[in-house]
Amino acid sequence: MKVATPDPNLPIGVFDSGLGGLTIVKAIQALLPQEEICYYGDTAHLPYGDKSAVLVQEFSRNIARFLVKHPVKAVVIACNTASATALEEVQKVAGTLPVFDVINPAVKVAIESSRTDQIGVIGTRTTIRSGVYTKKLLSHSPTARIIEKATPLLVPMIEEGWLQNAVSQDVIDAYLSDTGFQQIDCLILGCTHYPLIKPQVQRYFEENYDHQVEVVDSSLAVARSLSSGLLQRKIIRQDPKKTPHHIYFLSDYNVHFEETARVFLGKSLHFEVSPL
Ligand code: DGL
């Protein structure tokens, strides 16, 4: 069956529960500067990580419908919780449009980086409960030892803009000092909010471990898999001379979000509020 090709000049749809997906947007914009992005941050329903899989599937379906209608040429699920629970739902809504998740690329990077096959994963409760990381890592490396830990305080802390203060340091230390992590040589940041505190996580291991721990976030790997997917489908944007126009939607306006987004991306973003 011949798959219909979307217009290459359409934007790429990217969504997350809030700010975290911007870590993926940043990587996409660095690798594919000619592409336009249509971002949706579901701030009205944040955090996803404590919700049931059924509810996250419903939110994800609604956002996917919004993006497809916008329209977009591809959908990036820039959220681990939604990737863990709602990939199939989003694929159903997207129909013939390509859909990219954030879990498979992170798993591949972790398998390539780890020398001892002792891999830690931190993420939201719903992501960790899904067991998707263990399942996928073991499918690549059946003898690996995987230690998954839910770290639910990190998302509200990051959304609050607390990336580097005494409280964030204590929270990071409390989670990472779990004895289960002592032998790992690779830690997957299994939530797209966490790259915002990646330097702090790296510093924790440098200061407390006498062996090296690779801290893996999926943003670059996701951007690479998107790039090859667009190339394969021949839907790379055709008009690179025209400056891309990005558009950022939120389901609920929140001033902390805007401020943290500015600090993180190093530029102000204009958000349009469009509840679902
Ligand atoms: N950034 C998201 C993730 O990767 C969701 C965090 C949340 O809303 O709980 O899981």
Image (tube, grey):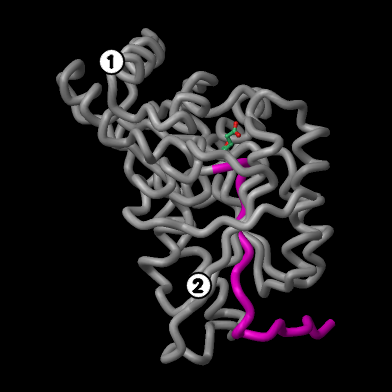
Q: Is residue 121 above or below residue 245?
A: above
User: Looking at the picture, which amino acid does disc 1 mark?
Assistant: Ala
Q: Is residue 193 above or below residue 180?
A: below
User: Looking at the picture, which amino acid does disc 2 mark?
Assistant: Ser
Residue topped by disc 1? 166
Q: Residue at x 76, y 49 (%)?
A: 275
Is 34 covered by the magenta stretch? no
Mark 2 Cα-neighbour bin, 10 Å: few <14, some 14–19, many ≥20: few
Q: Which residues are magenta?
A: 1-18
Quarter for ligand 1? top right
Mark 1 Cα-neighbour bin, 10 Å: few <14, some 14–19, many ≥20: few
Mark number, residue 138: none
Can you give x and y, in whole percent of width and height, for residue 105 in the image? 49, 52
Q: Nearer the viewer, residue 63 or 165?
A: 165
Q: Residue at x 38, y 31 (%)?
A: 187
Inspect this view and state whether residue 141 appears: no
Residue topped by disc 2? 228
Helix, strand or loop under label 2: helix
Q: Quadrant of residue 136?
A: top right
Q: Nearer the viewer, residue 260 or 33?
A: 260
Q: CA distance from mark 1 to mark 2?
A: 41 Å
Can you give x and y, in whole percent of width and height, for residue 189 in the image? 43, 35
Q: Is residue 136 left or right of residue 153?
A: right
**1 or 2: tag closer to the N-terminus:** 1
Q: Nearer the viewer, residue 170 or 119?
A: 170
Is 6 covered by the magenta stretch? yes
